[in-house]
Image: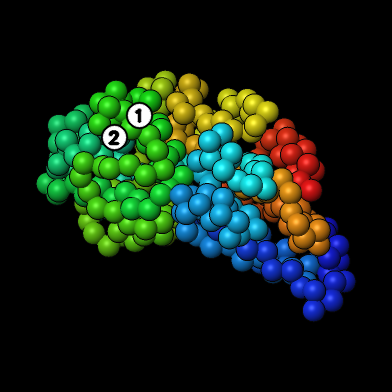
Amino acid sequence: MFAASIAATSSSNAQQLSGAGASFPAPLYQRWGAEFHKSNPAVQVNYQSVGSGAGVKNFTQGIVDFGASDAAMTDAEIAKVPQGALMLPVTAGSVVLAYNLPGVTDLKLSRESLAGIFLGKIKKWNDAAIAADNPGAKLPDLPVNAAYRSDGSGTTFVFTQHLAAVSPEFDEQVGADKSVSFPAGIGGKGNEGVTALVKQTPGTIGYVEYGYAKNNGLPMALIENKAGKFVAPTPQSGAAALASVELPENLRAWPVDPAGEGDYPMTSFTWLLLYKNYSDAVKMKALKDFVTYGLTEGQAFADELGYIPLPEAVVAKAKAVLETVK
């Protein structure tokens, strides 16, 4: 345990650690902060779920002590950070298609159907393409309402990166980024906003992090993977996809279209953003202890909250990078 590593610090020197960024891992980071505080009462961790785009911006401007993004920072973005930047994968999860379709369970979506929905080409749930994916299912004659992220989002990056890889038409018309222009649908802020849109309106489908769909009791579509199998998002199918990833030295990699038969096709690491150099040595020590907690004891909360615990090899690489923070 990290108990008392900082607990002896006097209340007058209590450390406030501020972080902001991705909504994808927010429930887990907030749980880590609460649990870490129990054994380190002199440290208060405040993490704001503002989206990956805003998280990178706040981090770059030095507004927070750490940032978070599901879309790892590019070399160009890193170059803009005066204190230097390091990225640590600290958890992982799947982007799922949560839907509200009364009477329909185990909805299957092929690559073509999924791209067609978010290109605005498929307008009714009983469209021939979706019917072909779901033989025997009683699909309603309801309009398709596609919900997407209105804010700059790493969840959007993971989702569009996959669709752009499997659909040349989607790549040409929409592309892959933290913020894109979808031809149809409705926007919601954060994973929270998209989840609410799906819950509120029958006929709605939206991409969110697995934990948000699970915790709100929303059904999730089975998605066709590279092997041609319709795979449900589960911790096991997500972990299978991650197992194919060999992290490079900069720890920046995604399984964009994993090839295994049991691989869920939209799974990603998510990264904490730390400065290479901190001017406050006490704050730096508190932050490193918090991140170490997340990489070790904190992994035990991943499955409960809908995330995928990191493979040991990834934890080892992340801890090695954390050691270089000064």
Q: Is residue 323 left or right of residue 193?
A: right
Q: Residue at x 58, y 25 (%)?
A: 244
Label 2 packing within 10 angstroms: few (<14), some (14-19), many (20+)? some
Amino acid type, callout 1: Ala
> Label 1 vs label 2: CA separation?
8 Å
Q: Earlier in the sequence, mark 1 or mark 2?
A: 1
x, y percent for residue 30: 60, 62
**In the rendered image, which residue does mark 1 sit on?**
164
Relative depth, front residue between 256 and 262 = 256
Kindly indicate whether the residue at mark 2 contacts the one at mark 1 (C-beta within 8 angstroms).
Answer: yes
- Point out residue 92 in the picture as x, y percentages from the top left corner: 57, 42
Residue 178: x percent and y percent?
41, 43
Give the residue at mark 2.
Answer: 174
Q: Amino acid at mark 2?
A: Val
Where does the image place residue 220, in percent across and percent down from the top left? Answer: 37, 46
- Which residue is at the far left? 141
Q: Secondary structure at mark 1?
A: helix
Q: Quadrant of residue 278?
A: bottom right
Residue 222 shows in this picture: yes
**Quarter the N terminus occupies:** bottom right
> Left or right: 36 with respect to 51?
right
- Quadrant of res 182: top left
Mark 1 or 2, which is nearer the eye? 2
Say whether residue 157 is left or right of residue 125: right
Question: Visible in this render: residue 30?
Answer: no
